[in-house]
Structures are given as C-alpha cells and as structure tokens.
Amino acid sequence: MTPEGEALLCQGADELKITLDDARQAQFAALMTLLQEANTKVNLTALKTETDIILKHFVDSLSCLRGGHLDGAGRVLDLGTGAGFPALPLAIMRPDTIFSPLDSIRKKIDFVRGAAEALGLGNVQPQVGRAETLGRDPAHRDTYDRVVCRAVAALPVLAELALPLLRPGGLLVAQKGPIAEDELEAGRRAATELGGRVTTVDAFALPVLGDARTLVVVEKVSPSPSKYPRREGVPASQPLFWTAR
Ligand SMILES: C[S@@+](CC[C@H](N)C(=O)[O-])C[C@H]1O[C@@H](n2cnc3c(N)ncnc32)[C@H](O)[C@@H]1O
C-alpha cells in the first residue's frame, strides 16, 4: 500500500473512532496486495483501485463496528462474504471473536481462506455453502451470536436467511446503503415472522466519501418457525412481505 493509501486508511478508521496500530496497518496492506493480485486472475471484486479498496471495502467494513453491536460476540457468521467483506477487516480488529465467512461460491472462499492464513488470522473459519442450507442444519441453526452481512439482499430476505442461524438474543447486523421505508417496513414484518425485532436503524455517512449507509440491527427474541428458511433460492425470489426488485 502506498503512503497515501496508509494515510487514507488511518483517516477513515479515525473518523470511525478506530485506531489502527502498526501490526494491523501491515495486515491491511498485505490484504490489499493479495486482493489486487488475485483480482488479476479471477474476478473477485469490482473494486480495483487502491483508493476504492481502502474506502469501499476496508473502511466500509469497519463501519460495522459502529454502535458496539459486535462487542462480546463469540461467533460471527458473515453471510455472503464475497472476497471476505466485512469478515476479514473485522477479524483483523477483533482477534478474540471467531468469524465464519460464508459464501456459496467456492473460488471466493478459497481466496478468503488463503488470505486469512497469509495474514495470520487464526480467528477466521471460512465455509462454502448457502445460508438456507446452514439454517436447516442443526450444527449451525440457533448457534451464532451475530450474523453480519453487507450488500447481499433486501432486509426481508436477510431476516429469513439470518435469524434461524442466530441463538436466542443474537443479533443480525446488516450493513446497507440508504434504506427505503418500504424495504424497512417489509424487513420489520419479516423479522417478526422469523422471531426477530428490529432494534436499531443507524443512518450515517461513510468516512471521507460521505456516501449514505445504514446499519440495521435485528435481535432474535424467539425461535424461528421450523418452516424457515425456505428452500435454496426461494427467500430471494419470493421475499416475505416484499416485492422483489
Ligand atoms: C454482492 S456480493 C457482496 C459480497 C461482500 N459481502 C461485499 O460486501 O463485498 C454478495 C455475495 O453473497 C453471496 N450470496 C448470496 N446469497 C447467498 C446465500 N443464500 N448463501 C450464501 N451466499 C450467498 C454471493 O455469492 C455473493 O458472493
């Protein structure tokens, strides 16, 4: 990473009230190199420039720490992690939390596994699979303290995919762009159907760029009905209380 990139990363983190020590800065720099190298061989992420990766992947992922919703979590599933976001930046910042980046696309998880090893992140346990499948597997259902996700689906879809995976009292922390009132309302209704309750809608501006972001937090207050999640693909193609766009 260039010195300008290092300064930008620190500025973005600083605006989120996060201090990056030298060891963590070195891990972000190594992740940048790995991501740019891998992107020349496989299409992992549309963001390719150093500035975009720093602001729209690294800093954007770190914004999931706003509000302290991940504090004290033992096991966190990153639903639809892609090239490891937000899981890898969060794992760098939270070495005492186990992160499980999940994606249905093997090449993405192969990258995440290799990157975690190269960065010395012993708290990352990547998995290839679909959230619908894990949600019906007793080894995963009702087990995670938190589910995080960024740029995966509309809120009603996320509610159906994530809430069955959470233990009672666990939280879904969904990082989204600006969220329309109708999506939020459908998300609230889907959360209720799945045994959840929307507790926080935190609208904020992304550091440096000022782009609109929203952290939506849903608490699991009662068990999810056993009919959920529906079979693979159905939550996204027929979202609860929501007309797919
Ligand atoms: C737009 S990408 C976002 C990736 C990453 N979260 C980010 O912000 O850069 C969405 C990812 O979610 C994955 N995905 C979508 N639905 C999924 C599901 N039901 N189970 C597992 N992965 C899923 C896709 O394969 C894709 O890699």
Image (cartoon, helix red, strand yellow):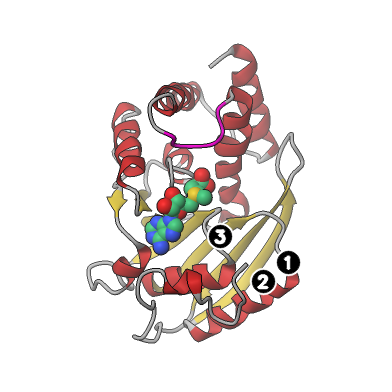
At which x and y percent is residue 159? 50, 72
| Side (left or right) of 33 relative to 48 | left
Q: Which stretch did the figure color magenta?
A: 43-48
Please say whether residue 99 is one of the residues in the magenta stretch: no
The residues tagged by marks 2 and 3 sit, at their Cα atoms, a distance apart of 13 Å
Marks 2 and 1, Cα distance to the nearest angstrom?
5 Å
Of marks 1 and 3, the one in the foreground: 1
Residue 73 in sight here: no
Rendered position, 34 above or below 206: above
Q: Residue furthest top?
A: 3
In terms of secondary structure, where does tag 3 sit? strand
Q: Position of residue 199 (x, y in %)?
A: 62, 72
Element under disc 2 = helix
**Label drawn at residue 183:** 2
Tell me the quadrant of the picture where the C terminus can be found.
bottom right
Residue 177 shown left or right of residue 91 in the figure: right
Left or right position of 244 against 234: right
For mark 1, what is the residue? Answer: 180
The residue depicted at 29 percent of the width and 74 percent of the height is 136
Q: Which residue type does callout 2 highlight? A: Glu
For disc 3, the marked residue is 174
- In the picture shown, does residue 239 fall above or below 40? below
